[in-house]
């Protein structure tokens, strides 16, 4: 597989092919090759993440003129997540074009959702640097349009726990836990109550017919507390 084939796959031709090469290069490849002329896709991933967020925000804002900020935020979170990025990446077979270290390849890296999602963000960042905002915008909307329509029709549902986890990982945090506070009702008709804790602080609570549902509702409440949140110095701040 080469960059020319991938450009045909995504229907986009790079002016600077090195940007695409970088976008398709995982850090494991760099660690094994020890070649200073090769750059991993981590910086492009950082940029692409911001561009993707901005493009989807702009699209939803303009299309849904009468929808409040909180609902727009929830829709964006459904669309912009690792699951969606990985789905788009697998549709484009991006895993087949990635430069991976031998160890990562042996461990199934070409099919790993996190690696595919990160590579998709890197490609978005590369397109932005290659031809600017409008090129990146066109690419994102074209690739994500089906997912956007599913989200707007209610067919694409949010995995609130995954969204919380991704926000934590993006900020280098891992200290989060779900605690079942109590159970009510007979065995055949129980209701579970769950708290979501971040460094010991309750940031969301929820209930459900199963522990899993209660945890999802706790994560949902945390997301809905102002729509966005910040994890900073072991502290949660709802905005």
Image (cartoon, grey):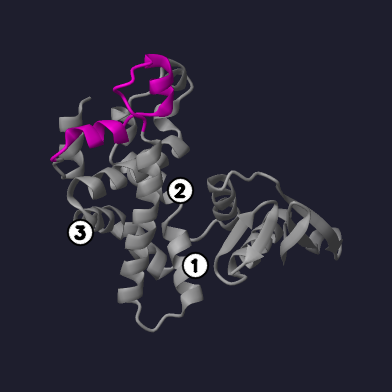
**Dot 1 corresponds to which residue?**
74
Contact? badges 1 and 2 (CB < 8 Å): no
- Which type of secondary structure does the marked residue at label 2 adopt? helix
Q: Is residue 37 left or right of residue 101?
A: left
Residue span colored magenta:
15-40
20 sits to left or right of 163: left
Q: For marks 3 and 1, give the CA distance.
A: 25 Å
Mark 3 or mark 1, earlier in chain? 1
Q: Position of residue 102 (x, y in %)?
A: 42, 16
Using the image, determine if residue 155 lies above or below residue 37.
below
Quadrant location, the C terminus: bottom right
Q: Quadrant of residue 4?
A: top left
Label 1 element class: helix
Q: Which mark is residue 203?
A: none
Rendered location of residue 160, percent (x, y) = 58, 58
**Mark 3 surroundings: few (<14), some (14-19) or many (≥20) residues within 10 A:** few
Nearer to us: label 3 or label 1? 3
In three-dimensional space, the C-alpha distance between marks 3 and 2, rounded to whole angstroms, equals: 25 Å
Within 10 Å of disc 2 (Cα), the crowding (few <14, some 14-19, many 20+) is some
Question: Would you place residue 17 above or below residue 70 in this image?
Answer: above
Q: Residue furthest bottom?
A: 66
Contact? badges 3 and 2 (CB < 8 Å): no
Instruction: Tell me if mark 1 has few (under 14), some (14-19) or many (20+) residues whose alpha carbon lies within 10 angstroms of its own.
Output: some
Q: Quadrant of the N terminus?
A: top left
- Please name the residue that numbered disc 3 is placed on: 134
């Amino acid at each position: 597989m080469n960059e020319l084939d991938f450009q045909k796959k995504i229907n986009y031709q790079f002016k600077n092919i090195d940007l695409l090469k970088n976008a398709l290069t995982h850090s494991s490849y760099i660690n094994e090759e020890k070649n200073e002329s090769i750059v991993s896709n981590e910086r492009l991933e950082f940029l692409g993440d911001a561009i993707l967020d901005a493009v989807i925000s702009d699209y939803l804002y303009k299309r849904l003129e009468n929808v409040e900020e909180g609902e727009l935020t929830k829709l964006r979170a459904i669309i912009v997540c690792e699951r969606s990025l990985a789905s788009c990446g697998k549709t484009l077979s991006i895993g087949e074009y990635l430069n991976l270290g031998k160890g990562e390849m042996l461990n199934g890296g070409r099919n790993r959702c996190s690696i595919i999602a990160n590579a998709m963000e890197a490609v978005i960042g590369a397109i932005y640097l290659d031809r600017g905002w409008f090129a990146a915008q066109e690419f994102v909307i074209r690739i994500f349009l089906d997912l956007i329509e599913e989200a707007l029709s209610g067919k694409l549902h949010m995995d609130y726990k995954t969204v919380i986890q991704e926000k934590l990982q993006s900020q280098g945090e891992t200290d989060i836990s779900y605690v079942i506070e109590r159970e009510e009702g007979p065995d055949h008709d129980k209701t579970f109550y769950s708290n979501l804790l971040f460094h010991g602080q309750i940031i969301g609570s929820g209930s459900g017919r199963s522990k899993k549902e209660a945890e999802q509702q706790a994560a949902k409440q945390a997301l809905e507390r102002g729509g966005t949140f910040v994890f900073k110095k072991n502290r949660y701040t709802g905005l």
